[in-house]
Image (tube, rainbow, N blue to C red):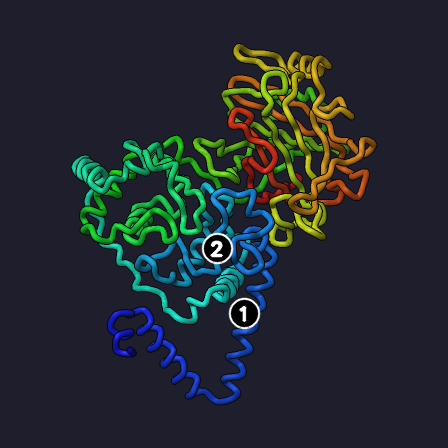
Amino acid sequence: MLVFILLFCPQISQAIESRKIEKLIEGAQSPTEKKLRTQEKESILRRGKEYYFKFCVHCHGKEGKGDGKASNHIFPQPRELSQGVFKFHATQTNTLPLDEDIIRTIKKGIPGTAMPAWNGILSDEIIDSIVKFIKTFSARFGMEVPGREIAITMESPFDSLSIAYGKKIYKELRCEKCHGENGDKEGELSKTLKTFRDTTWFVYDLSRKNFYKAGSSGTDIYRTLATGLDGSPMNAYDYISDFERWHLVHFVQSMHSVKRGETFPAINKIISKRIDRPIMLDLEESIWGKALETPISIRPLRARRNPISRLTIRSVHNKKKIAIKIKWEDPTPDNILNNNYVDQSAIQFAVDDSDIEDSPFYGMGEKGKMVNIWHWKADVRQKIIKSGKSKQKQIAKNAKSRAGMFVNPFTESSVEEMNSRGIGALTVQPLGDQKLKGRGYWYDGHWNVVFIRNLEATSKWDIDFSDENQVVLAFALWDGSKKEMNSNKMVSFWQTLIFR
């Protein structure tokens, strides 16, 4: 039986040999060395557990089963770490990943999903400890060793001949069955695919290189083709030649849209510009022009076709007030008058934390760490300017119109302040505490939403700007035309707002 295992189960054989070597090393150590090594391992695991429960448990769950409190609101659902099946790795298909593979995923995040990039937020030491703790969820890491790393061969010339040959391979491998003839995920099987957990599998648009979950560079796509995405319908094309694989890479890259490939850092610094003018809703555009415009990347919590992926932020403040302006492209303004699903935006502030590493869960806060939310919803009072130029004063005048329905039956404002201590714990502040002012107008294919509030907080539920040099904030958008509401939205990760 042992001979059979050694012959037909090379992974188990390698694991046995690896454990033998470990035992030999341990046997050669003195009792003091063994104790120090054990203490070091335990210390690393304790640190990894601490940060896992701080940043990862909300989605991946206490035991790594992908059943955290946020998991039901996310699509694709969080990875089930307890089975030791990882989609992104540089090793052979259906084998364990290298530590470097898991580290790469944590650092870069997974575009098009709710998994943010943690590089720059967490140190290398912390990420390494999280990886070691994650590996305790699955018994596979105690029984197997990582598979053989796939070698990335020399890339063939990227030219029209390579693209044409790659297109031929694309058809021969029947890639269009899932990804569509032009890579736009309209293949006949795209809506029937399932993961190993029997959950729906979302096929992304291959032209949007910023949505490639394992990376869109030549080596990234080559690696994905060679290893597949374990636990998903995407199998490994390790049986085709290296040249064929590179030709296929080039054809896939030929689909990339330059315009859609625009990306921004996961974390950005938003500068609030000090001005000496009164801050009101009809603030002139020339004043906004003095503030630095900062692009922010947002991602859908539930994967969809052609989501809004970018918004821009401007902020100004004086001695008493702060104003924050959100702008995003939206070809169809949706308000209460013409749609049950309306366009919305929100800003979320970490009330008691001014550093991202100490901030609460970016999905509505958590127990013991409250967030303050400024929410805007398009109602019939939002001015729709479809063409031509209009003076800012006229826009403001029209925005103040009181005709139509109110968003909240207890207030005449289209904005309101809320608080949350975690998923399912959202509350609207009492009417007496509603000090936020705001309005939105749609012009030339863009929504412009302005929030204004005093720097000083009037209640313990509010973010206080008066004594802060930096605050932590995040953004959310709902696109009414895509029937988005509640947790079906697009969000940013935590950003920082700095006063200057």
> Mark 1 = which residue?
44
Residue 125 in sight here: no
Identified by mark 1, the residue type is Ile
Element under disc 2: loop
Residue 413, above or below 37:
above
In the displayed structure, does residue 270 sit left or right of residue 436? left
* Residue drawn at 64 percent across, 50 percent down: 359
Identified by mark 2, the residue type is Glu
Q: Earlier in the sequence, mark 2 or mark 1?
A: 1
* Mark drawn on residue 80: 2
Element under disc 1: helix
As rendered, which of 449 and 233 lies closer to the eye?
Answer: 233
Q: Residues within 10 Å of mark 1 (few under 14, many from 20)?
A: some
As rendered, which of 360 and 194 lies closer to the eye?
Answer: 194
* Residue drawn at 51 percent across, 44 percent down: 114
Q: Residue 66 placed where, x, y %?
A: 52, 53
Q: Residue 326 placed where, x, y %?
A: 60, 30
Residue 294 in sight here: yes
Q: Nearer the viewer, mark 2 or mark 1?
A: 2
* Residue drawn at 26 percent across, 78 percent down: 3
* Residue drawn at 44 percent across, 51 percent down: 197
As measured in the structure, the alpha-carbon distance from the residue carrying label 2 to the one carrying label 1 is 22 Å
Q: Residue 295 placed where, x, y %?
A: 52, 35
Residue 423, above or below 7:
above
In the displayed structure, does residue 460 sit left or right of residue 327? right
Quarter of the image that includes the N terminus:
bottom left
Residue ranking furthest to the top: 388
Residue ranking furthest to the right: 432
Residue 43, above or below 166:
below
